[in-house]
Image (cartoon, rainbow, N blue to C red):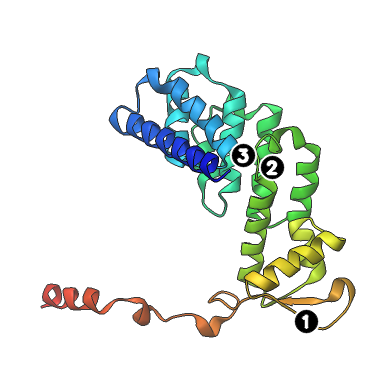
Amino acid sequence: MGMERDLGQKHQSSVAEAVEQLVAVNPYNPDILPDLENYVNEQVSSQTYSLDANLCLLRLYQFEPERLSTQIVARILVKALMAMPAPDFSLCLFLIPERVQMEEQFKTLIVLSHYLETARFRQFWDEAAKSRHIVEAVPGFEHAIQAYAIHVLSLSYQKVPRSVLAEAINIEGLSLDKFLEHHIANDGWILEKGQGRGQLISLPQNEFNHPGLKKSAADSIPLDHITRIFPILS
């Protein structure tokens, strides 16, 4: 098993390097379009991600609109959603023709993106449940969105109610108990005393949910940067 895993990782690495070289040498060469499409499928199966390669493919589709694959574009957008809070989805959407965006599956993905950007997680999961054929085609989607939801909650809460967490990550009951046990053991979460949905979970402190930790601008400027400024001012 270990040898098979190592061989798989080497294959993924070699594929990624080959595609990166293609993109670097001639990103506007339409001959590389099939390689980039195959690489999108490789990203899906191996649960890896390359924004640069995907943007290059979307740009090529602009020059070769008759070769555009809506299945590939949908997979690119799902992978971009999984990269949130990075702005990858907007960067990709900008390169997709409006006529393609008007197709039902892309309308759905745009709605999902809006729900995530506005932290409307209940609406997101409800909409995603109606469109499983789109999002479940990409392994790791649910886990990536749950990680993003936790990221958003950690910016806002020092202590998050169990009910709010459950809604944000779309997990309830025993599954939520196991989820909490994992994060308590590995990520410093603390379960407050209490029962039921009103129980509180203490999240690790950061500069956003605990303003006292926020560094001042002066503290964040390295000394060597300051010393470089003095000759300019004099």
Considering only order in the chain, which callout, 1 or 2, is on the residue closer to the N terminus? 2
Q: Is residue 138 left or right of residue 170?
A: left
Please say whether residue 48 is visible from this viewpoint.
no
Image vertical order of residue 195 relative to residue 121, above or below = below
Say which residue label 1 marks.
192
Quadrant of residue 131 within the rendered picture:
top right
Q: Distance between the residues labelled 3 and 1?
A: 36 Å
Q: Which residue lies furthest to the right in this view?
A: 196
Is label 1 in a helix, a strand or a loop? Answer: loop
> Gap in Å between the C-alphas at discs 2 and 3?
12 Å
The residue sitting at 18% across, 78% down in the picture is 227
Residue with the mark numbered 2: 111
Precedes in sequence: disc 3 or disc 1: 3
Q: Where is residue 157 in the image (x, y as percent from the top left)?
A: 67, 74
Q: Nearer the viewer, mark 3 or mark 1?
A: 1
Amino acid type of the residue that numbered disc 3 sits on in the rendered structure: Val
Amino acid type of the residue tagged 2 in the rendering: Val
Q: Residues within 10 Å of mark 1 (few under 14, many from 20)?
A: few
Residue 89, by quadrant, is: top right
Quadrant (top left/top right/bottom left/bottom right) for the C terminus: bottom left
Residue type at mark 1?
A: Glu
Q: Which quadrant would residue 70 be assigned to in this image?
A: top right
Instruction: Indicate left or right for 196 with 178 as reference.
Output: right
Towards the viewer: 36 or 28: 36
Q: Mark 3 = which residue? A: 78
In this view, the residue in front, 192 or 89, is 192
N-terminal label among 2 and 3: 3
Quadrant in which the N terminus is drawn: top right
Q: Residue 221 carries which label?
A: none
**Is residue 123 placed above or below 195 in the rendered structure?**
above
